[in-house]
Image (cartoon, rainbow, N blue to C red):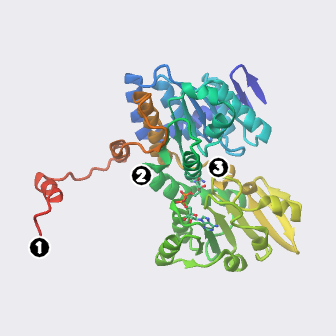
């Protein structure tokens, strides 16, 4: 481990590769770069301390640089023990960013680093999964006076924040960045769709074509994973607990059945539910020889790996692949059951993270501009900001669209005209 006054990273000498990866990400994140150019001129975050617990990837690095360009002082740690890109962490440390993160963190280091970010006394928090907010609320309530707002990146984090709000436990305003259309309908759908498969392929190099691939959860992520999996020629089977989403899956042409049935016929299993023990030990025992299990939901609770470890001893057969032998059958688990796209691959492609992180950057600006005026609730960014992000991305892609004529505007606003 390399340590400095304001950083702890795996190897500071990896910075060179980190700078190159940041350069590539910036070339693919044109919408966010537009935000950065404006931030550089206007400095909307001047004097604001931003504490972040986000996957430390090259795309997050581009966000950090954007916030710094806006005048912020930034401290960052990871939000998952396996998702840090060590070269990017090294590059950020070299740039003078306060960064504590390495791939393969112990639980102790994970929470020590989270507490380093808290000790930085942030005015705005950015979370992916709510660990930072929850630690502040549990142990550092005296710091909340200084906090303007928090921004949350993922579905699981929003669920936890809404539970805090319901219990009257929430003590500062939270912006649900995940709920931007330009986040959950793009990042969760296209991003998770592609990068989950990327993670499984890097861990296993298994062929998807002709396989029975069981996808647990048909939300924004599950829909994306199903679509891409079908595109690879697999037979997609969906499991759900929500009637409407199960119906959507069936009408999209997928087989839908309970996990107990799917367990017997699946070759590859992917969980994306945000729930726990969706694939439990009783299901694993029903599986075929050489079944592959992967999770892309936020926490490593979706596949009951703890129980699996009690039943059989894992053998590491490839960098992100563990083999368990149960009743003579081999079962493979990717990335220790942690989100496979970040554990075994590089997370979402930069283009997708560009719109997600425009949401984070603009949420910070919105919070700073509305200091003291935001309700202590889980709130959404105004729709105009979401629309602006979509425009920035269309612009980056060189796509033009039509505008309503005066006649069309009037027609859409009127109720008198009929057949
Ligand atoms: N890997 C990534 O990079 C990434 C990106 C975005 C979101 N996420 C995470 O992925 C998870 C899913 O996100 P989402 O936006 O699709 O959420 P969502 O709420 O839109 O969908 C989750 C779906 O899972 C279903 N579900 C719940 N329990 C189930 C069970 N026991 N069996 C089968 N289905 C069940 C729900 O009914 C729902 O339809 C969350 O944890 C989120 O934080 C991961």
Q: Quadrant of the C terminus?
A: bottom left
Q: Which mark is residue 419?
A: 1
Residue depicted at x 72% and y 43%: 81
Q: Is residue 253 visible?
A: yes
Residue 10 visible somewhere in the drawing? no
Q: Which mark is residue 181?
A: 2
Splitting the image into four quadrants, where does ligand 1 fall? bottom right
Q: Say left or right for 119 vs 147.
A: right
Please tell me in which quadrant of the rendered image residue 111 appears: top right
Residue placed most toward the observer, 335 or 107: 107
Q: Position of residue 217 (x, y in %)?
A: 58, 66
Disc 1/disc 3 C-alpha distance (Å): 54 Å
Q: Position of residue 73 (x, y in %)?
A: 55, 23
Numbered mark located on residue 342 in the image: 3
Crowding around mark 1 (Cα neighbors within 10 Å: few <14, some 14 to 19, many 20+) is few
What is the spatial separation of the Cα atoms under label 2 and label 3, in whole angstroms?
Answer: 22 Å
Residue at disc 3, secondary structure: helix
Q: Nearer the viewer, mark 1 or mark 3?
A: 1
Pick out the residue farthest to the front: 168
Mark closer to the observer (2, 1): 1
Please name whichever residue, 98 or 201, is drawn nearer the observer in this view of the structure.
Answer: 98
């Amino acid at each position: 481990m390399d340590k400095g006054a304001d950083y702890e990273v795996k190897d500071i000498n990896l910075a060179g590769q980190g700078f190159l990866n940041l350069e590539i990400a910036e070339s693919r994140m044109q919408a966010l770069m537009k935000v950065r150019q404006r931030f550089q001129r206007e400095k909307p975050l001047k004097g604001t301390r931003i504490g972040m617990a986000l996957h430390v990837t090259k795309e997050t690095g581009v966000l950090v640089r954007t916030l710094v360009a806006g005048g912020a002082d930034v401290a960052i740690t990871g939000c998952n023990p396996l998702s840090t890109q060590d070269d990017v962490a090294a590059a950020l440390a070299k740039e003078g960013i306060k960064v504590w993160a390495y791939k393969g963190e112990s639980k102790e280091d994970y929470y020590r680093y989270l507490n380093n970010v808290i000790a930085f006394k942030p005015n705005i928090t950015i979370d992916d999964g709510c660990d930072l907010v929850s630690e502040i609320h549990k142990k550092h309530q005296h710091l909340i006076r200084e906090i303007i707002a928090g921004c949350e990146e993922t579905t699981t984090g929003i669920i936890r924040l809404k539970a805090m709000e319901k219990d009257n436990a929430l003590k500062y305003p939270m912006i649900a960045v995940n709920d931007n259309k330009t986040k959950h309908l793009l990042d969760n759908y296209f991003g998770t769709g592609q990068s989950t498969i990327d993670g499984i392929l890097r861990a296993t190099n298994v062929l998807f074509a002709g396989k029975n691939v069981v996808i647990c959860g048909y939300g924004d992520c599950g829909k994306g994973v199903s679509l891409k999996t079908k595109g690879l020629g697999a037979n997609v089977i969906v499991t759900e607990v929500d009637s409407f989403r199960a119906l959507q899956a069936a009408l999209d042409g997928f087989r839908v059945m309970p996990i107990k049935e799917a367990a017997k016929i699946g070759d590859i299993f992917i969980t994306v539910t945000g729930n726990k023990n969706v694939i439990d030990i009783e299901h694993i025992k029903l599986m075929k020889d050489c079944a592959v299990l992967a999770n892309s939901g936020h926490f490593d609770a979706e596949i009951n790996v703890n129980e699996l470890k009690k039943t059989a001893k894992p053998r590491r057969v490839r960098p992100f692949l563990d083999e368990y032998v149960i009743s003579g059958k081999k079962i493979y688990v990717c990335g220790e059951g942690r989100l496979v796209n970040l554990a075994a691959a590089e997370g979402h492609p930069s283009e997708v993270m560009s719109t997600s992180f425009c949401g984070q950057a603009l949420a910070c600006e919105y919070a700073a501009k509305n200091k003291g005026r935001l309700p202590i609730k889980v709130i959404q960014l105004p729709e105009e900001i979401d629309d602006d992000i979509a425009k920035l991305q269309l612009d980056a892609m060189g796509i033009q669209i039509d505008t309503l004529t005066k006649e069309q505007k009037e027609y859409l606003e009127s109720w008198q005209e009929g057949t």
